[in-house]
Image (spheres, rainbow, N blue to C red):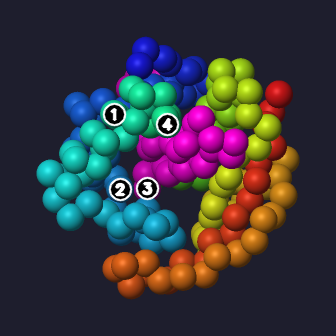
Amino acid sequence: MDMMLETKRLKIVPFEMSRLEEYISAFDGEITKYQYPDPFASAEAARETLQGFIDLMEQNEMLFLSILTPDGEFVGGVEVHGIQEEYPELGIWIKKGEQQKGYAYEALAGVLNFTDDAYFKDWYVYEADVRNMGSMKLVEKFEFRKEGLDEFETETGKLLRLQRFLIRSRR
């Protein structure tokens, strides 16, 4: 898919396998502490999962994007799952060392502006673990409503307390 979004400080582009090592090394246990996925067990597992996301993007089922600085440094990822659904689900993460710089808000706002124009959605699902203060503060920068709390244990034993939000379209 040919697309590039530019914000004030970022370039947001479709993920490419040439960034696999950067993705794997940044998507570690600390980043995934309050997320459903765990770090990848191997480079091959990562390649298989991420290729599946690329395939879904090519089928117009999701957006799977890399967040880059203007000089091309990888700072994280943003996804819009179920782009054809009534309520697509947003996901975003910023690598350690680049957090608390406003990149998550800037990237998510840019992606929402794009999807609002391209797909005409009214609401997006966003889930954040209530212990993840950065993610909880991020949602407050958008118009939102709370939809409930889901507490469960993942297959790998991680306990999650996910607050479900609906974020209103920016159009």
Q: Quick one: 65 or 30, which is closer to the camera?
A: 65
Q: Which residue position is annotated with label 4?
A: 62
Q: CA gap, disc 3 to disc 4?
A: 25 Å
The quadrant in which the N terminus is found is top left
What type is the residue that disc 1 sits on? Asp
Q: Earlier in the sequence, mark 2 or mark 1?
A: 2
Q: CA gap, disc 2 to disc 1?
A: 20 Å
Q: Residues within 10 Å of mark 4 (few under 14, many from 20)?
A: many
Q: Earlier in the sequence, mark 4 or mark 1?
A: 1
The local secondary structure at tag 2 comes to loop
* Among the 4 quarters of the image, the one containing residue 54: top left
Q: Which residue position is annotated with label 2?
A: 27
Q: Which mark is residue 55?
A: 1
Span highlighted in magenta in the image: 67-96
Disc 4 + disc 1, Cβ < 8 Å:
no
Residue 69 location (% of width, % of height): 47, 29
The residue drawn where x is 20% and y is 64% is 41
Q: CA gap, disc 2 to disc 3?
A: 9 Å
Question: Residue 12 colored magenta?
Answer: no
Q: Residues within 10 Å of mark 2 (few under 14, many from 20)?
A: many
Q: Earlier in the sequence, mark 4 or mark 2?
A: 2
